[in-house]
Image: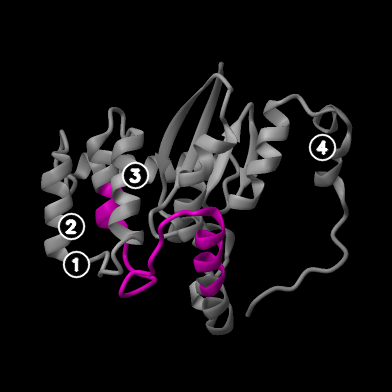
């Protein structure tokens, strides 16, 4: 049985698509998935990156692409009324619902559906109250304990090398994005490529030029 970690922030449409398709990618295998909420904005800040929605032409393309991908994969997705938005309320709710801050698949799915189905404002306070009541968290999402746990989960993800969401970790290997699901499956099926030097060699390529901001 494989232990798999799924790092996510419900702000990411790619995370919703990967979440929805993950059972298909793992069909027939023995596994346990742990869902790990992280603050995507903090991950971007740590690595000095802008999010896709912070670059105007890329924003338009990203939204078109995810809507096409949803149609292509048969996953229901409507853009929320506003995006990006502040996901902290949803992330803290995820942490508050889960033992040790780790929500189960049902809770994770409800948070994704809250954002990516219906086309409504994902950060609307009334809607947040409604989903909180429905999920009935064991702890107060606004408590210092929950806030600290979300930060700790994000910090741990950064220590593991996570640079974006969704990221799937298994056996210390990271697979980033919806389009990495076939690669993940190949690894779990024992593809000989992963036993070759290729995986480790990719990290040894020399940097030819470096652009710095400022």
Task: Look at mark 3 in the image and give the residue it sits on.
Answer: 109
- First in sequence: mark 3 or mark 1? 3
Alpha-carbon distance for marks 3 and 1? 18 Å
- First in sequence: mark 2 or mark 4? 2
Task: Look at mark 1 in the image and give the residue it sits on.
Answer: 124
Percent from the top left, x then y, of residue 36?
A: 42, 39
- Disc ID at residue 128: 2
Q: Is residue 203 above or below residue 11?
A: above
- First in sequence: mark 3 or mark 2? 3
Whether tag 3 and tag 2 are in contact, CB under 8 A, the answer is no
| Near-viewer residue (128 or 44) | 128
Does the magenta segment cover residue 183? no
Q: Residues in magenta? A: 64-92
Q: Is residue 127 above or below residue 59?
A: above
Alpha-carbon distance for marks 2 and 4? 43 Å
What SS does tag 4 mark? helix
Which residue is depicted at the point 46% across and 45% down?
20
Task: Look at mark 4 in the image and give the residue it sits on.
Answer: 200
Percent from the top left, x then y, of residue 81?
A: 30, 74
| Near-viewer residue (213 or 5) | 5
Number of residues whose C-alpha sits closer than 10 Å to that of mark 3, classed few (under 14), some (14–19) or many (20 or more): some
Does the magenta segment cover residue 85? yes
């Amino acid at each position: 049985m494989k232990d798999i970690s799924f790092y996510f922030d419900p702000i990411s449409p790619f995370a919703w698509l990967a979440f929805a398709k993950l059972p298909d990618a793992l069909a027939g295998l023995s596994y346990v998935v742990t869902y790990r909420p992280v603050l995507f904005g903090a991950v971007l800040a740590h690595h000095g990156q802008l999010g896709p929605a912070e670059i105007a032409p890329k924003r338009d393309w990203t939204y078109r692409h995810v809507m096409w991908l949803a149609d292509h994969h048969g996953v229901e997705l409507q853009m929320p009324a506003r995006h990006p938005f502040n996901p902290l309320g949803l992330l803290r709710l995820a942490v508050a619902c889960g033992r040790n801050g780790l929500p189960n698949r049902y809770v994770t799915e409800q948070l994704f559906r809250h954002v990516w189905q219906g086309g409504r404002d994902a950060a609307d306070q009334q809607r947040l109250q409604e989903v909180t009541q429905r999920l009935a968290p064991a702890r107060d999402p606004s408590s210092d304990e929950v806030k600290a746990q979300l930060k700790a989960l994000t910090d741990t993800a950064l220590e593991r090398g996570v640079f974006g969401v969704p990221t799937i970790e298994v056996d210390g290997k990271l697979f980033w994005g919806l389009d990495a699901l076939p690669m993940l499956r190949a690894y779990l099926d024992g593809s000989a490529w992963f036993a070759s030097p290729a995986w480790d060699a990719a990290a040894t390529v020399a940097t030819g030029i470096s652009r710095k901001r400022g």
